[in-house]
Image: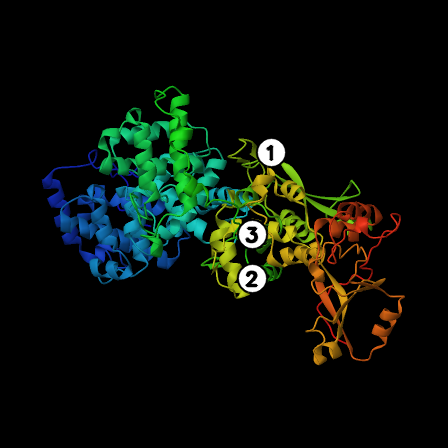
């Protein structure tokens, strides 16, 4: 490249790309700028472009030396193979800048970002409109280099489609840029980011623009403030912010900046409303309570709802110290009559529930929130003890009567289809993003099967640690991938971390779950340790990818809709939406109703509950199990027995029965009883052989059995407790029954004590006791 004069004394390009020319240091008088504009006009386009026939000795070159020298030095400093085409583009870029200086009457190092952006255009079409016709598309990148090196231009967000990577290569050097990107890429690759792959193009696009904005290609000089400025000033397109987030995490891992704020800007505005004094008390309680953040947030939201009610109905009670038992009673009465949407700040998402009466669990939860607030404030001596919160804010009996175990079990048919979908999950079933699957299929399958088989809460699933699966055979530990014979019969144990109701514990699970967890752990990329929000420990979470733990809401938001689509079942039923917690109730109920069911205490240990009362809220006896238990209990057969009776049809047809002749003969085994109201006789189970009795060995009984017109039928006889004991328990119970009947009159009049029956003789008349319906033969 030709340098016009060797003794130019104008500004020189700094040795580093960090600092552009200072416009104040090299500014000059209007007369000089006017002379430069005239010289540029005198040189003309042909000389300025330095075509083959340009005049290097023309007088105008000396007049514009302070403008020309930095431009030539900038071109010489660019690290780019100098082909004839690129050389021509460089020279034309210099000519375009000089012509614009003549048009504006201002030196290019004093141009604003808007002026540089106007020259460069938002795209190639905009550049052609602003630049001379002879400036082709190859000129624009070199103009961008001049803007960056000489004008301090970094507003690349105004340039639209533009190869920032190529510019960074030319300005900083390709090896240096690629080396710094490689440092960041290696960190992301270790976490499992797709950005860590060599074929990824997103990271270089974003990283080079960050380098240009920082005017340095060194990762050590990427500060937290730079990343925050890029976000706040929207210097990158919205689609690139995820890549920027990952890049900052990698730079933070290298120790050069702080990690990005978790979830910044994605949460809705904090709830507010009601008297300021009441809101301050609610915030003070929130900052002091040791409950989990989620529970504290829920209670605070209820307290703010109470504040809105106070503002509307009882403004004199805005100070909690002014509350009395009467205020508590007024709040309970108002809550009992409230509907969904009353005194809330936002009604979005309530849908068709808006305006419906509050359900009993909602009322009880809101009463518990206010009760907790006043109990704590009194316990911490913030408020005087003017009333007992447990009594004054207790749940009314009318509400408490509607509370109780009511597990929302998923129907067996729907649950079976969801299990089939989870077991047969394929990569094609996963939700797709523009870049493909967000999580590996092994991770999604492991999370899915954990939900389907472990019976744990979504929070506990998200907090499982690496190595939580253990295989054992008769107490001997076995590797999950072992080929030993003993491994075929090994049991799979799952270590569950501490949760909201108990400490850590171990439970047996189906081997299919253990195999899925082992498969994911085998390919899981190394991840940084995470702080367990419940225990405060630094642990290796099993379900983590790209240095980010899988959210506890991932099951509800992604896994369940995916399984419902694959299984062809709706995402809701008559009990509401299918949620992660309903699986816990469904599994517990199925174990409780199995052919060989778990007892309540066994189920309590398997679920990890502290008390069996909690287990009752998950285990529900199915109608089929209840029916089977009812049948096994033999309620009907326990209280009713059948006895055979002979019907004399001739006596009925001839009218002899109407005249008082016996026509019903109850078979007692050792004889017949002709008493018409036999089922009401107290001696039916221990016949005293009164006048209605006919022994079977008598001639009368033999003649009766020889008749051909008899009809045999079965009659159901209800039993008393003593009679049932005599049948079920044997001779001792029979003796007790006979003793109690000794003085009770028989149907014919005399009591058994007065009938000539030896005291040593005991009878059990109903010998053939059968259960069934009446039959005829």
Kindly identify which residue carries mark 3: 583
Q: Nearer the viewer, mark 1 or mark 2?
A: 2
Question: Would you place residue 569 above or below residue 201 in this image?
Answer: below
Mark 1–mark 2 distance (CA, rounded to whole Å): 33 Å
Q: Which one is in front, 78 or 342? A: 342
Q: Which one is in front, 628 or 567? A: 628
Circle nearer the N terminus (1, 2): 2
Circle nearer the N terminus (3, 1): 1
Is disc 1 placed on a helix, strand or loop?
loop
Circle nearer the N terminus (2, 3): 2
Question: Would you place residue 669 above or below residue 275 in this image?
Answer: below
Is disc 3 placed on a helix, strand or loop?
helix
**Residue at 43%, 44% in the rendered image:** 361
In this picture, residue 611 sits left or right of residue 575: right
Q: Position of residue 719 (x, y in %)?
A: 71, 55
Q: Which one is in front, 210 or 120? A: 210
Kindly identify which residue carries mark 1: 503
Mark 2–mark 3 distance (CA, rounded to whole Å): 11 Å
Q: Position of residue 471 (x, y in %)?
A: 73, 45
Task: In the displayed orientation, state which residue is furthest to the left.
Answer: 31
Q: Quadrant of residue 85?
A: bottom left
Disc sitting over residue 414 in the figure? 2
Q: Which one is in front, 381 or 128? A: 381
Is disc 2 placed on a helix, strand or loop?
helix
Q: Position of residue 194 (x, y in %)?
A: 51, 51
Crowding at mark 2 (Cα within 10 Å: few <14, some 14-19, many 20+): some
In this picture, residue 460 sits left or right of residue 39: right
Residue 297 visible within the image: no
Q: Position of residue 599 (x, y in %)?
A: 67, 45
Q: Quadrant of the C terminus?
A: bottom right
């Amino acid at each position: 490249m030709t340098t016009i004069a060797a003794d130019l004394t104008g500004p020189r390009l700094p040795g580093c790309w960090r600092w552009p020319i200072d416009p104040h240091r090299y500014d000059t008088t209007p007369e000089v700028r006017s002379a430069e504009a005239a010289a540029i006009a005198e040189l003309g386009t042909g000389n300025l472009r330095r075509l083959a026939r340009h005049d290097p000795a023309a007088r105008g070159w000396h007049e514009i030396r302070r403008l020309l020298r930095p431009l030539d030095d900038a071109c010489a400093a660019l690290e780019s193979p100098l082909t004839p085409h690129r050389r021509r583009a460089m020279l034309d870029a210099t000519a375009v800048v000089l012509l614009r200086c003549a048009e504006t009457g201002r030196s290019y190092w004093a141009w604003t970002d808007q002026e540089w952006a106007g020259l460069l255009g938002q795209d190639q079409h905009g550049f052609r409109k602003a630049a001379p016709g002879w400036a082709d598309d190859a000129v624009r990148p070199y103009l961008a280099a001049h803007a960056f090196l000489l004008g301090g231009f970094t507003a690349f967000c105004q340039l639209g489609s533009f190869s920032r990577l190529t510019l960074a290569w030319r300005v900083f050097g390709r090896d240096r840029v690629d080396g710094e990107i490689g440092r960041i890429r290696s960190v992301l690759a270790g976490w499992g980011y797709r950005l860590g792959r060599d074929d990824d193009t997103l990271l270089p696009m974003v990283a080079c623009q960050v380098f240009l904005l920082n005017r340095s290609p060194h990762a050590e000089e990427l500060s937290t403030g730079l990343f925050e400025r890029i976000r706040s000033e929207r210097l990158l397109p919205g689609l690139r912010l995820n890549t920027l987030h990952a890049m900052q995490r990698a730079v933070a891992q290298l120790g050069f900046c702080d990690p990005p704020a978790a979830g910044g800007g994605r949460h809705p505005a904090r709830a507010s409303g009601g008297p300021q004094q009441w809101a301050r008390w609610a915030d003070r309680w929130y900052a002091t309570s040791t409950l989990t953040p989620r529970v504290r947030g829920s209670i605070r939201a209820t307290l703010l709802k109470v504040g809105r009610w106070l503002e509307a109905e009882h403004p004199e009670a805005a100070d909690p110290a002014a509350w009395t038992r009467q205020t508590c009673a007024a709040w309970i009465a108002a809550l009992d009559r409230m509907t969904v949407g009353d005194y809330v700040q936002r009604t979005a998402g309530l849908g068709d529930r808006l305006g419906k009466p509050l359900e009993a669990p909602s009322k009880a939860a809101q009463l518990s929130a206010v009760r907790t607030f006043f109990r704590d404030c009194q316990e911490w001596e913030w408020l005087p003890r003017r009333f007992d919160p447990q009594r004054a804010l207790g749940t009314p009996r009318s509400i408490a009567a509607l509370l109780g175990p009511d597990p929302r079990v998923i129907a067996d048919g729907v649950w079976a289809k969801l299990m089939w979908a989870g077991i047969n999950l394929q990569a094609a079933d996963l939700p797709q993003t523009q870049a493909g699957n967000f999580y590996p299929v092994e991770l999604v399958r492991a999370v899915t099967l954990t939900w389907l088989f472990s019976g744990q809460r979504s929070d506990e699933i998200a907090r499982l640690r690496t190595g939580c699966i253990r295989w054992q055979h008769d107490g001997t530990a076995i590797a999950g991938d072992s080929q030993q014979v003993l491994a075929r019969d090994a049991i799979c144990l799952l270590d569950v971390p501490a949760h909201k109701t108990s400490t850590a514990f171990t439970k047996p699970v189906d081997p299919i779950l253990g195999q899925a967890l082992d498969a994911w752990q085998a390919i899981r990329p190394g991840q940084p340790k995470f702080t367990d929000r419940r225990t405060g420990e630094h642990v290796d979470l099993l379900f983590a990818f790209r240095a980010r733990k899988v959210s506890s809401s991932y099951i509800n938001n992604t896994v369940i809709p995916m399984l419902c689509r694959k299984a062809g079942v709706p995402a809701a039923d008559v009990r509401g939406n299918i949620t992660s917690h309903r699986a816990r109730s469904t599994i517990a109920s199925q174990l409780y109703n199995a052919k060989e069911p778990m007892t309540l205490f066994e189920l309590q240990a398997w679920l990890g509950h502290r008390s069996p009362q909690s287990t009752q809220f998950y285990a529900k006896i199915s109608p089929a199990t209840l029916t089977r238990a009812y049948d096994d209990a033999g309620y009907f057969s326990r209280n009713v027995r059948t006895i055979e009776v002979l019907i004399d049809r001739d006596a009925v047809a001839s009218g002899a029965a109407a005249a008082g002749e016996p026509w019903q003969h109850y078979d007692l085994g050792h004889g017949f009883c002709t008493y018409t109201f036999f089922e009401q006789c107290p001696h039916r189970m221990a016949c005293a052989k009164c006048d209605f009795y006919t022994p079977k060995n008598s001639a009368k009984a033999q003649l009766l059995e020889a008749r051909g017109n008899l009809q045999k039928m079965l009659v159901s006889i209800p039993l008393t407790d003593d009679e049932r004991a005599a049948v079920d328990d044997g001779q001792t119970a029979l003796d007790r029954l006979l003793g109690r009947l000794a003085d009770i009159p028989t149907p014919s009049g005399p009591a058994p004590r007065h009938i000539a029956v030896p005291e040593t003789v005991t009878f059990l008349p109903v010998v053939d006791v059968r259960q069934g319906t009446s039959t005829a033969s």
